[in-house]
Image (cartoon, rainbow, N blue to C red):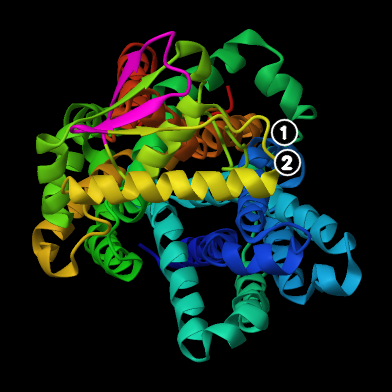
Amino acid sequence: MTGAEKKVIFASSLGTVFEWYDFYLYGWTAAQIGKKFWTMFDPNVQFIVALLTFSAGFLVRPFGALVFGRLGDLVGRKYTFLVTIMIMGLSTFFVGLTPSYETIGWAAPVILITLRLLQGLALGGEYGGAATYVAEHAPHGRRGLYTSWIQTTATIGLFLSLAVVAGARNSMSPEQFGDMGWRIPYLFSIILLGISLWIRLQLSESPAFQKMKDEGTHSKAPLTEAFGNWPNAKIAIYALLGLTAGQAVVWYTGQFYARIFLVNTLKVDANQADTAIIVALAIATLAFVFWGWLSDKIGRKPIILAGCLLAALTYQSAFRQITHYANPTLEAALASAPVSVTANPADCNLLFDPVGGKVFKTSCDIARQVLISLSVNYQIVYDAAATPAVVKIGAKVIPSFDGAALDAKAFGEQRGAFAKAVGGEVVAAGYPAKADPAKVDSPMLIAVLVYLALLVTMVYGPIAAALVELFPTRIRYTSMSLPYHIGNGWFGGLLPPIVVTIVAATGDIYAGLWYPITIALITFVVGLIFIPETKDRDIYADD
């Protein structure tokens, strides 16, 4: 690897690390943002609306892929990812400067939402630009290795954002952090932006794009050429279903849902869970580069599809192992103390709640939500005469209530009393209120988390090279960005609420895993049939 090639990889990767830092930062400070920008709501709704604002960044990523993918194919890779990092960095910095609701009223949340949408749009354009730029600088036979460094950036960005937030939080009192300290990581991003711009400004345009532009053969209408004719559009659909959809659910399950499962379902202390996940990701991170290197030898397709297949075959057992090592008391209770909800089927709705903001008020829905929050498996028994629904824990019967006619205050009080009653009985039946830190088998828990992280590296390490090689140079930026961001922004980004919905519908804390299992299997089958092996393709040939 020459010095110039190292510089290309370093500059592209470093900028992408900072963009992921900016993107994840919001997740770690959502509670503080809710209190500052959504003061007009009660504390629970504040956090919910803050998460809604967070989700907006995921949902607009495909649109950013279209906007900046087109720009990258029209005017160049270097110019476009300079624009995206400027938008991301400045948007993040301005979040730290935006006055609260108490200062400027409704203008505060409007500004916040606008900045978050800009962050999502910028991220939608950044990844495709960085991956394309590095791949077009890489020598033939080493594209997998070179682009795999880009794949490490999401994990490193997550580490960096968590570290900066933790540093700020631990350097002051909780009150000080909640008041002004949460702004420090956002303001710090301006330094990261300056470093990224300084490095990227020293880079030259991609040789493949520059040659094409000099010859006047670059696309004049990338969107139309990429998606307006069936041969190219068909490849984008195959790339989505046969590569990125499965990659996304494996990535989000291993890096995000594993933490949600540990903290929300198994009630493991958040610091203990975060430590285990960080250690596991740190151990596995270099595997991104290993799989990228290996994909240059044996191909992209077998590694990505093998990762999807292994995930589909082992997720159920892996998450049961997480329960065994993280909360053995809960594992024992799930086996020995069955719980049921007897309800009128008309009162049992689909508990799909993408951002946690919907209030379910039928007696069946209330009962199921309370049990899910307590990590209790349950069986649903349908009985048209069961109005209201009742929860049965052993011989104990606890009636739920219908909250449709209650105002918000009365509903909250009655739901709280019901949750307390159910919670007391499930604890009496052996269900722990939280995981006992002394009973957590940390080495074995980390080992299972490392396995999940290694699956992430298998599907994610070679993905950039695979996508770059699927499409011709003239429309590469546009064509690869859209399936990548639909896969990761929608299939992956919506994984947590979809999983929670499945758990609520079935009463089984492991049932939600069938969503990533199903998508991973679809990707395995579609990829096996329709995705060609591309490692030996000449990406400079513009056909």
- In the rendered structure, the answer to whether residue 258 lies left or right of residue 336 reads right
Residue type at mark 2 is Lys
Q: Can you give x and y, in whole percent of width and height, for residue 83 in the image?
A: 74, 57
Q: CA distance from mark 1 to mark 2?
A: 6 Å
Residue type at mark 1 is His
Chain-order first, disc 1 or disc 2: 2
In the image, residue 294 sits, relative to residue 118, either above or below, namely above
Give yes or no for residue 492 being in the magenta stretch.
Answer: no
SS state under label 2: helix
Rendered image: mark on residue 337 = none
In front of the other: 420 or 302: 420
Q: Can you give x and y, in whole percent of width and height, for residue 201 in the image?
A: 67, 69
Q: Quadrant of the N terminus?
A: bottom left
In front of the other: 265 or 513: 265
According to the image, label 2 marks what residue?
Answer: 213
Rendered image: mark on residue 218 = 1
- In the rendered structure, the answer to whether residue 314 lies left or right of residue 524 reads left
- In the rendered structure, the answer to whether residue 394 lies left or right of residue 386 reads left
Q: Quadrant of the C terminus?
A: top right
Instruction: Tell me if mark 1 has few (under 14), some (14-19) or many (20+) residues whose alpha carbon lies within 10 angstroms of its own.
Output: many
Instruction: State whether residue 291 appears in this view.
Output: no
Q: Which residues are magenta?
A: 377-396
Mark 1–mark 2 contact, CB under 8 Å? yes
Give the quarter of the image for residue 335.
top left
Instruction: State whether residue 395 appears in this view.
Output: yes
